[in-house]
Image (cartoon, grey):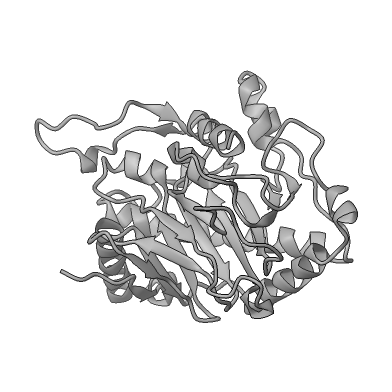
Amino acid sequence: MTLQVPAIDIAPFLSGDADGKRQTVEAVRAACRDIGFLVIAGHGLPAEDLKRTFDLTRDFFDLPQAAKDRWHPTGPSKQRGYHAFESRGLANTLDAKVPRDLRETVFLGPVDDFRPDYTDLPEAELSYWPNTIPTEPAGVDDAVIRLYRGFERLSADLLRIFALALAMPEDHFADKIDRHFSILSCHHYPALTEPPLPNQLRTGAHTDFGAMTILAMTQAKGGLEVHMPDGSWAGVMAAPDELVVNLGDMMARWTNDRWVSTLHRVVNPPDLADAMSRRQSIGYFMHPNYDAKIECFPTCLGAGEAPLYPTITAGEHIAMKIEKSHNA
């Protein structure tokens, strides 16, 4: 059987129409079960918010290196502020020893300060560490915060769909994400001035860490590829009004691998130095509350079946993955 990444309009679900909700849930369930990736339309995220963030972060990445480095975080949290080209290697989260990724990134963590909720859990502090947000060019800080809020709302809507697709109440995830520590990542993949090292990619093959990822991307050569069930790699491209959604490792653990966290990568363009190969993407990585338990949902456990994974908290899981990505 040949599978493709499906495109699903979620507007009928968001409108509240009963038939539309049912059809959307069925389509999403099939995509999550079969491939773990989907392309969504009708999501309600304003196009102007995405364009403004792409434009302003591109201007930031065009600044001199010394100016960008001013926004590298000085605190212990590793997913805040600016991280330079070749500073991280995501393939290493799966213990693949390959060179670091050909990209630079601005990270934004939770906008709300949930640290007072975790005073009895000091290890959670890093997950809710204050942001280091660039303020040049003017307006970039407001743009990334506004977009974070938009993805925050959309992720909650998608989790309502997921809950119904897993035969659970629609609000099942509500009390698991009300103190989330999700990450917004603004990635820049520049045209290259020298050849990459052997096996070095724009982003090495990896699975995502959290519950799910929502991704916007510019149209450029050298892009996202998904490892298909038949072992091949297939390119994924979204139209300007569409977003890519994929499941992360937490969702696979929650569902006892009934839903899949799929291997993916960002490949190098055919002509590495071609100015048209310059690429940007903005991803929202949905991480639930730090102390949310990642354990098999009862609806995903058959009679006599045992969970495939031990129970772990969301915070413990993410900390382990981030540490590996920096130890390339």
Q: Quadrant of residue 256?
A: top left
Q: Residue at x 57, y 71 (%)?
A: 217
* Side (left or right) of 307 relative to 185: left
* Side (left or right) of 227 relative to 201: left
Q: Is residue 153 above or below residue 99?
A: below
> 205 or 54, which is in the foreground?
205
Where the C terminus falls, by quadrant?
top right
> 27 or 261, which is in the foreground?
261
* Side (left or right) of 293 relative to 136: left
Q: Is residue 72 above or below residue 304?
A: below
Return the residue found at the far left. Answer: 304
> 121 or 39, which is in the foreground?
39
* Side (left or right) of 100 relative to 113: left
Q: Residue at x 55, y 71 (%)?
A: 269
Where the N terminus falls, by quadrant?
bottom left
Q: Is residue 319 above or below residue 154?
A: above
Where residue 59 appears, as percent x and y from the top left, is 81, 69
Where residue 187 appears, as percent x and y from the top left, is 65, 60
Q: Is residue 43 above or below residue 126?
A: below
